[in-house]
Image (cartoon, helix red, strand yellow):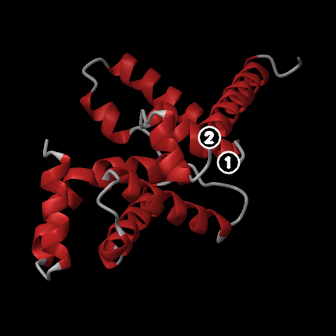
Amino acid sequence: MATQAEEYSIIEQCRQGDSEVYAVLVERYQEMIYNVAYWMLGDEESAKDVAQESFISAYGSLTAFKNDAKFSTWLCSIAMNKCRDHLRGRKATVPLDDVAELAVAKEPDPEAALSRKQSSREIQTALSALPAEYREVIVLKHIEGLDYREMEAVLGVSANTLKVKTHRAREWMKKYFEKRRCPDG
Protein backbone atom coordinates (compact mmCIF):
# COMPACT_ATOMS: atom_id res chain seq x y z
CA MET A 1 0.00 0.00 0.00
CA ALA A 2 1.32 3.40 -0.98
CA THR A 3 1.88 6.14 1.52
CA GLN A 4 -0.08 9.36 1.48
CA ALA A 5 3.00 11.13 0.12
CA GLU A 6 3.12 8.69 -2.80
CA GLU A 7 -0.55 9.36 -3.51
CA TYR A 8 0.07 13.11 -3.46
CA SER A 9 2.89 12.55 -5.94
CA ILE A 10 0.55 10.60 -8.25
CA ILE A 11 -2.07 13.34 -7.97
CA GLU A 12 0.52 15.99 -8.80
CA GLN A 13 1.60 14.01 -11.88
CA CYS A 14 -2.06 13.88 -12.98
CA ARG A 15 -2.41 17.63 -12.46
CA GLN A 16 0.61 18.11 -14.71
CA GLY A 17 -1.01 16.13 -17.52
CA ASP A 18 0.06 12.52 -16.93
CA SER A 19 -3.44 11.03 -17.00
CA GLU A 20 -2.18 7.43 -17.28
CA VAL A 21 -0.81 7.40 -13.74
CA TYR A 22 -4.39 7.97 -12.47
CA ALA A 23 -4.95 4.26 -13.15
CA VAL A 24 -2.89 3.53 -10.02
CA LEU A 25 -5.45 5.35 -7.87
CA VAL A 26 -8.38 3.76 -9.71
CA GLU A 27 -6.89 0.30 -9.15
CA ARG A 28 -6.23 1.04 -5.50
CA TYR A 29 -9.73 2.32 -4.67
CA GLN A 30 -12.09 0.75 -7.20
CA GLU A 31 -13.23 -2.01 -4.85
CA MET A 32 -13.88 0.40 -1.98
CA ILE A 33 -15.85 2.83 -4.15
CA TYR A 34 -17.83 0.04 -5.81
CA ASN A 35 -18.71 -1.42 -2.39
CA VAL A 36 -19.90 1.95 -1.07
CA ALA A 37 -22.04 2.44 -4.17
CA TYR A 38 -23.34 -1.11 -4.10
CA TRP A 39 -24.48 -0.99 -0.49
CA MET A 40 -25.99 2.47 -0.97
CA LEU A 41 -27.84 1.64 -4.19
CA GLY A 42 -28.59 -2.06 -3.90
CA ASP A 43 -27.82 -3.17 -7.43
CA GLU A 44 -24.67 -4.12 -9.26
CA GLU A 45 -25.11 -2.16 -12.49
CA SER A 46 -25.95 1.10 -10.76
CA ALA A 47 -22.99 0.62 -8.42
CA LYS A 48 -20.64 0.08 -11.37
CA ASP A 49 -21.99 3.19 -13.10
CA VAL A 50 -21.72 5.36 -9.99
CA ALA A 51 -18.21 4.08 -9.23
CA GLN A 52 -17.10 4.94 -12.75
CA GLU A 53 -18.75 8.37 -12.58
CA SER A 54 -17.02 8.97 -9.25
CA PHE A 55 -13.56 8.29 -10.65
CA ILE A 56 -14.24 10.43 -13.71
CA SER A 57 -15.53 13.27 -11.56
CA ALA A 58 -12.58 12.98 -9.16
CA TYR A 59 -10.12 13.10 -12.03
CA GLY A 60 -11.79 16.21 -13.40
CA SER A 61 -11.64 17.85 -9.99
CA LEU A 62 -8.09 16.95 -8.94
CA THR A 63 -7.19 20.64 -8.85
CA ALA A 64 -9.73 21.03 -6.02
CA PHE A 65 -8.18 18.20 -3.97
CA LYS A 66 -6.26 19.56 -1.01
CA ASN A 67 -3.16 17.62 -0.06
CA ASP A 68 -4.06 17.87 3.62
CA ALA A 69 -6.75 15.20 3.25
CA LYS A 70 -6.72 11.51 2.44
CA PHE A 71 -7.48 10.90 -1.22
CA SER A 72 -9.67 7.91 -0.29
CA THR A 73 -11.84 10.10 1.98
CA TRP A 74 -12.22 12.77 -0.71
CA LEU A 75 -13.04 10.13 -3.33
CA CYS A 76 -15.55 8.47 -1.00
CA SER A 77 -17.36 11.79 -0.50
CA ILE A 78 -17.62 12.17 -4.28
CA ALA A 79 -19.05 8.64 -4.50
CA MET A 80 -21.57 9.34 -1.73
CA ASN A 81 -22.73 12.47 -3.56
CA LYS A 82 -23.09 10.48 -6.79
CA CYS A 83 -25.13 7.87 -4.87
CA ARG A 84 -27.39 10.59 -3.47
CA ASP A 85 -27.89 12.01 -6.95
CA HIS A 86 -28.68 8.55 -8.28
CA LEU A 87 -31.18 7.85 -5.48
CA ARG A 88 -32.93 11.18 -6.04
CA GLY A 89 -33.27 10.31 -9.70
CA ARG A 90 -35.07 7.02 -9.25
CA LYS A 91 -38.21 5.73 -7.60
CA ALA A 92 -38.45 5.04 -3.87
CA THR A 93 -38.10 1.29 -4.30
CA VAL A 94 -34.63 -0.11 -4.71
CA PRO A 95 -34.34 -3.17 -6.95
CA LEU A 96 -32.57 -6.07 -5.30
CA ASP A 97 -29.95 -8.02 -7.15
CA ASP A 98 -28.34 -11.28 -6.26
CA VAL A 99 -26.31 -9.59 -3.51
CA ALA A 100 -23.60 -12.10 -2.78
CA GLU A 101 -22.67 -13.77 -6.05
CA LEU A 102 -18.97 -13.08 -5.68
CA ALA A 103 -18.85 -13.95 -2.00
CA VAL A 104 -20.82 -17.15 -2.54
CA ALA A 105 -18.45 -18.31 -5.25
CA LYS A 106 -15.59 -18.27 -2.71
CA GLU A 107 -17.50 -20.28 -0.12
CA PRO A 108 -16.44 -23.96 -0.13
CA ASP A 109 -19.48 -25.27 1.81
CA PRO A 110 -22.74 -24.98 -0.20
CA GLU A 111 -24.85 -24.71 2.96
CA ALA A 112 -22.66 -21.90 4.32
CA ALA A 113 -22.77 -20.24 0.89
CA LEU A 114 -26.56 -20.32 0.85
CA SER A 115 -26.74 -18.95 4.38
CA ARG A 116 -24.31 -16.16 3.53
CA LYS A 117 -26.25 -15.31 0.38
CA GLN A 118 -29.52 -15.14 2.34
CA SER A 119 -27.93 -12.92 5.02
CA SER A 120 -26.61 -10.55 2.36
CA ARG A 121 -30.06 -10.34 0.79
CA GLU A 122 -31.64 -9.57 4.16
CA ILE A 123 -29.06 -6.87 4.88
CA GLN A 124 -29.51 -5.32 1.44
CA THR A 125 -33.30 -5.38 1.86
CA ALA A 126 -32.97 -3.64 5.23
CA LEU A 127 -30.50 -1.09 3.84
CA SER A 128 -32.86 -0.38 0.95
CA ALA A 129 -35.67 0.34 3.38
CA LEU A 130 -33.48 2.47 5.65
CA PRO A 131 -33.74 6.24 5.14
CA ALA A 132 -30.79 7.46 3.03
CA GLU A 133 -29.17 9.54 5.79
CA TYR A 134 -29.00 6.44 8.00
CA ARG A 135 -27.98 4.13 5.15
CA GLU A 136 -24.95 6.36 4.55
CA VAL A 137 -23.67 6.04 8.10
CA ILE A 138 -24.24 2.27 8.24
CA VAL A 139 -22.41 1.75 4.95
CA LEU A 140 -19.47 3.96 5.91
CA LYS A 141 -19.15 2.84 9.54
CA HIS A 142 -20.04 -0.84 9.48
CA ILE A 143 -19.40 -1.94 5.92
CA GLU A 144 -16.42 0.23 4.95
CA GLY A 145 -15.06 0.53 8.50
CA LEU A 146 -14.46 4.28 8.50
CA ASP A 147 -14.00 6.01 11.83
CA TYR A 148 -16.12 9.03 12.77
CA ARG A 149 -13.38 11.50 11.78
CA GLU A 150 -13.24 10.00 8.28
CA MET A 151 -17.02 9.90 8.07
CA GLU A 152 -17.10 13.57 9.08
CA ALA A 153 -14.83 14.39 6.12
CA VAL A 154 -16.91 12.30 3.70
CA LEU A 155 -20.35 13.51 4.76
CA GLY A 156 -19.56 17.02 6.02
CA VAL A 157 -21.40 16.39 9.27
CA SER A 158 -19.95 16.62 12.80
CA ALA A 159 -18.72 13.46 14.49
CA ASN A 160 -21.27 13.91 17.30
CA THR A 161 -24.12 14.12 14.80
CA LEU A 162 -22.77 11.02 13.04
CA LYS A 163 -22.67 9.12 16.32
CA VAL A 164 -26.33 9.97 16.92
CA LYS A 165 -27.28 8.99 13.35
CA THR A 166 -25.34 5.73 13.66
CA HIS A 167 -27.12 4.91 16.91
CA ARG A 168 -30.52 5.69 15.38
CA ALA A 169 -29.67 3.67 12.28
CA ARG A 170 -28.69 0.66 14.41
CA GLU A 171 -31.90 0.98 16.39
CA TRP A 172 -33.91 1.19 13.17
CA MET A 173 -32.16 -1.91 11.80
CA LYS A 174 -32.71 -3.77 15.08
CA LYS A 175 -36.46 -3.00 14.99
CA TYR A 176 -36.62 -3.89 11.32
CA PHE A 177 -35.12 -7.35 11.91
CA GLU A 178 -37.26 -7.91 15.01
CA LYS A 179 -40.41 -7.21 12.96
CA ARG A 180 -39.22 -9.59 10.24
CA ARG A 181 -38.69 -12.38 12.79
CA CYS A 182 -41.99 -11.73 14.56
CA PRO A 183 -44.37 -10.18 12.01
CA ASP A 184 -47.28 -10.25 14.51
CA GLY A 185 -45.36 -8.26 17.16
* Residue found 19% across the figure and 59% down from its top: 8
Relative to the observer, which residue lies in front, 179 or 80?
A: 80
Q: Which residue is mark 1?
A: 133
Residue 42 appearing in the image: no
**Mark 1: which amino acid?**
Glu
**Mark 2: which amino acid?**
Leu
* Residue found 60% across the figure and 54% down from its top: 95
Secondary structure of residue under mark 1 = helix
Quadrant of residue 21 within the rendered picture: bottom left
Of the image marks 1 and 2, the number of the one nearer the N terminus: 2
The C terminus, quarter of image: top right
* Residue sitting farthest toward the right: 184
* Residue sitting farthest toward the front: 68
**Residues packed near mark 2 inside 10 Å, few (<14), some (14 to 19) or many (20 plus):** many
Q: Which residue is mark 2?
A: 127
Secondary structure of residue under mark 2 = helix
